[in-house]
Amino acid sequence: MYKMSEYAFIAAILATGLALILYIAYALSGLRAARMQTAGGNVRTGVMGFSGGPRTAALGRYATILGWLGFAFLSAWLVFRTIATGHGPFANMYEFSVSFAWGVLGAYYWFERRYHQRMLGLFALPVALALMLYATTIPSTVEPLVPALQNNLLLSVHVAVAIVAYGSFTIAFAAALLFVIQPEGGRWGLPKPEILDDISYKAVVVGFPFLTAVIVLGAIWADVAWGRYWSWDPKETASLVTWLIYGAYLHARVVRNWRGRKAAYLLMLGFAATLFTYFGNLFFGGLHSYSGLG
Amino acid sequence: MTQQAQTGRLPADGPAPTDDVIRREAGFGIDDLLERLWDLLTSMKFGVIIILALAALGLVGTMVIQAPPGISADPAAKADWLNEVRPRYGGWTGIMDQLQVFTIFESIWFRALAALLTASLVACSAHRLPGLWKSATKPHVAIGEAFFTHAPQHEFIAVRGTSDEIRERVSRVLNKHRYRVVSEDDGVLHLYADKFRWGPFGTVIGHLSLVVILGGAIVGSMFGFRDSNFVVAEGSVAPVTSGEGISVGLVQFQDAYYTETGAPADYASEIVIYKDGTEVASQTIRVNEPLRYGGLSFYQSFYGPAAAMRVTDAAGNEVMADGVPLAWSDGDTGRRVGSFVIPGADLTVWVIGTAGTGDPIIAPGQMRVELYQGSQGTSVDAATIDQRTSAELAGYTFSFDREMQYTGLSVARDPGTPLIWLGSFLMIAGFVLVLMFPHRRVWGRLVVRSDGRGMLSLAGAGRRDVNSNTEFTDLVTDVRAAFTTPTDA
């Protein structure tokens, strides 16, 4: 099972990498088509307001299929690794990174199906790929659990919920990035700002309750294992900071004039906080130092 | 929370209107002041700023080393600790300490922001409740004609029949979709239908849940008890200082390691709880398996070496025989240190273990005993003792019987915890209400001519949102179907 999981992981990296190349090609062809259109060229206009010649559409389709393949391989990895270790694959930095990548791809394809905005993949896939490549630098050997982690139920649920939250926030970030890089009013064959704003908001609406659940489950576990529901452990605090930033975003979005660009900046800040929470235990120690990296 | 955008009753735009009022009246009466305060507290911008400020403090708390809890009560310990971190923060150490940066979560900044946030949460909830209540219980039924052409979702349906028949038929469709229907007739028939009218209250529940959680934290810190450094050696019993006559005996501590990696596999303490000397509970506690007794919880927290010591006085009477946990470590030498007091004498005994094989003074298998005058702290005598031997010091015989282990527990009673769980539950419940049961509203307007032909206008108040759109479309489709049944043809 361990061998199988390794093969699945490598296959997932290859599929996602190839998918990313196609997404980039797709974006470039879309950009070219947009240019030609502004220059008065004769290009058919696609449904979502940007041009989609037949070649562009085909590129996009293949990109999606390959990305799905990557997601399928990662799902296989998840199953094999769970069987090999006997717990959800969330116990050290290697397992958590690959699972995080799985969450990003899963969230991305959920949104792609719903909103048909392939350009999001341009920023979502690199995050997933980077997480997987990062995971290859960490030893993947299966190691038994230290005493604090010996709570199969809470370990699996606490971290599984975190993966959904982090995945959603990555999509919110990708949409915010697309929003911010285009000039006022939208250009370059990118999705319309209003659609991006809506995608970000929906992603946070999913991610925020899940992050809340992560923190609550963490508090329950902390109460069982460490004797207090809250210890201001750095990782705890970082997750609270992340929660506050996304909470601020949800409120700021309601304030007139704060929607759009300002909200997008808050989302980028929120994603930075998410990554800080995620990688935090590598440099600030504390009670969550289970990374397996010393 | 998440759905405030659609209610249109938001304190969103800050205190702008009141500014005008105040300027007009050109005075600062107490009413103006209160009004301004209210506007500030219910302002969304202000809320966002508080939240972000709290996030900034949290960030400081993760980046700057935080002093161990309780250290600020002990000036000497605090000075020691500050000296420890001084190399890292240099000349800033004093300033940072003044600004309470090292205890950021107990600082005046943090408390003030938490208080402001609470005030804002309560004010916003109070501000919103009447509107939510009104739209749930006394909805606006008769609505102007213009709305039906400007609403984000609207539809016109040609109908036939009498006003009552048509109302009946439309109501049946709406009821089938689990909408309740209210109608008013002022020459024109007005219809109002909604479902999940209590959904928006999830927002208020979600916000107030934070107040409950903060309340739980305050209750815990005011009425709770916590000893995170409770140590007891194997074979000994040590009292818990919570004033309930509880003491803890350690039968045995065991630590297990994985043979391949050497990583810890298990820490287990077999403990017995006594109340006023009587055994009331016992359990083998592990990291994820605490013992709970009468509101107190006992957690496996740390462990270390202990020394079984025996002291007899000159007459040969045993004055002390117990395990001494070597629970402190001497920062300079790395030696483990424990202490006890000889009953009835002004003597404090330090028991010092070896730092390892390279220790020039205390070899492995030895224990050093140092005697100090309790009241003055002056050194009286000292000796290094081999295992199972003894030494004469200050008229007493000190025996070091054997090495063993102690366990370190965290003992806590936190009466605020139920509030924390209640708050957490309410918060999740609030999300569920808001996200899964969004308030759906539909208005109808029916005008019937004397020849029995009429026009039914329907409009929804949903956002331009995929879900509420399909819901409205389905509804309209069903209403249309109800008027094109074969009997009508």
Image (cartoon, coloured by chain):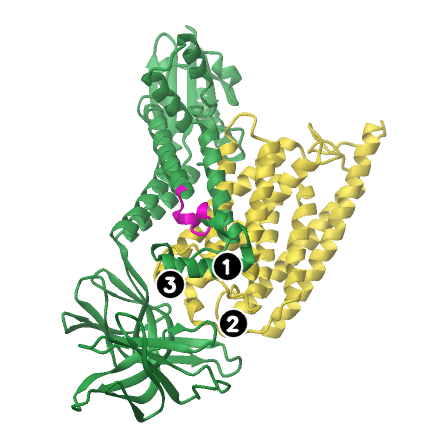
Circle 3 packing at 10 Å, graded few (<14), some (14-19), many (20+), is many
Residue bounds of the magenta highlight: B98-108
> How far apart in space, not on screen, are marks 2 and 1 (Cα)?
41 Å
Three-letter amino acid code of the residue under disc 1: Val
List the residue tagged with mark 3: A226
Residue B101 on the magenta span: yes
Residue A30, image x, y percentages: 77, 39
Circle 1 packing at 10 Å, graded few (<14), some (14-19), many (20+), is some
In front: B128, or B461? B128
In the rendered view, tell whether residue A294 sits above or below residue B148: below
Three-letter amino acid code of the residue under disc 2: Thr
Colour for chain A in the figure: yellow
List the residue tagged with mark 1: B85
List the residue tagged with mark 2: A85
Q: Residue at 33% of width from left, 28% of height from top?
A: B126
Say which quadrant the N terminus of chain A sits in: bottom right
Q: Are marks 3 and 2 in contact (CB under 8 Å)?
A: no
Say which quadrant the C terminus of chain A sits in: bottom right
